[in-house]
Amino acid sequence: MIASATGAPGRIVRDLTRPLAVFTRITTEHLELHGSRDRYLAAKARLLELVSARPDGIAVLDAGDPFGFPHLAATPVATRLTYTDLPDVAADLQAEAIVVEPSAVRFTARTPWGSAQVRLRLAGSFNVRNALAALAAACATGAELGSAIRGLEAAEAVTGRMELIDLGQPFTVVVDYAHTTDALETVLHELRQTTSGRLWAVFGSAGERDLEKRPAMGSAAARLADVSVITDEDPRGEDRQLILEQIAAGAVAGGGRRGENVFVIPDREEAIGFAVANAAPGDTVLCAGKGHEKSIETATGEIAWNEREVAIEAIRRRIS
């Protein structure tokens, strides 16, 4: 038997044929596809309904998701396992004693199959939730806890996702895909924990996409970063300057000051170079929005782009 919904462990039997669905937190990500968080939740709920229709279905849910969990938890399923990194939320899998490092995170995993120390070679405490979800899925289908943890600890950082660019410079440069308000806020909160100096945010907002997030992202950066450098992301067919001014208006409304800690630099390479050139020892420069993507979409077509290489070149110019 595998673990029950109450978390009682039993005899380990590998069974990879059982339908299993893992649900992560519902944010404003992918709303360009779903239209709203309610419709996004409804799409996830349909997946859960498919799993619950099977007498051997397994659902892994984020108990700390205030938006999605109450609805998803109401659907009966043969085996339900919950996970959380919040100390005041009850769950089958719990993370305790979380320690955030510049390029890693450590925690204690309390699970129905036992407790263990985990060290992920991934930056950002949000990866703790992802790790717990993976542990639940692996162990619920019969994997041994120690083996599952070794697999997690062997995982390497994904290009463009909280990727540390380290050439020995006395400040930190991070490339991340954060391109929504929620994602930007999360990453800035994470980086603040490991930044002794100023926190820089180099970011933009896509053209022909959600208009409301532009001032919201500007406001978030003004509140959570020390310096905001607003630049192109994917303007597509829109007026690039109009997009940037909409973001800047949000930054000013959030307490930023144009020319002091809010700068508008349309050319993304120039914007990254500006931040890197002016970063002081102990500062952190976040390059957000492009991550792993290989192009910038403009009205005249795609421009080849590699955020990691642009950041590396900017650092080289600074330290040469």
Image (cartoon, rainbow, N blue to C red):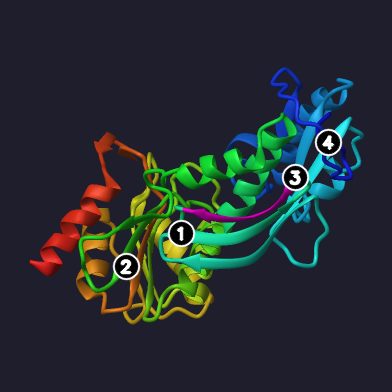
> Sequence order check: which comes first, mark 1 or mark 3?
1
The residue singled out by tag 2 in the image is 172
> Badge 3 local density, few (<14 within 10 Å), some, or many (20+)?
many
The residue singled out by tag 3 in the image is 113
Residues under numbered marks 4 and 2 in contact, where contact means CB atoms less than 8 Å apart = no
Cα separation, mark 2 vs mark 3, equals 38 Å
Q: Which of marks 4 and 2 is in front?
A: 4
> Sequence order check: which comes first, mark 4 or mark 3?
4
Q: Which of marks 1 and 3 is in front?
A: 3
Residue 10 badge: 4
Q: Which of marks 1 and 4 is in front?
A: 4
Q: Which of marks 2 and 3 is in front?
A: 3
Specify start and end residues of the magenta stretch as a single range. 113-120
Horizontal arrangement in the rendering, residue 56 relative to residue 19 (left or right): right
Cα separation, mark 1 vs mark 3, equals 24 Å
Horizontal arrangement in the rendering, residue 52 relative to residue 25 (left or right): right
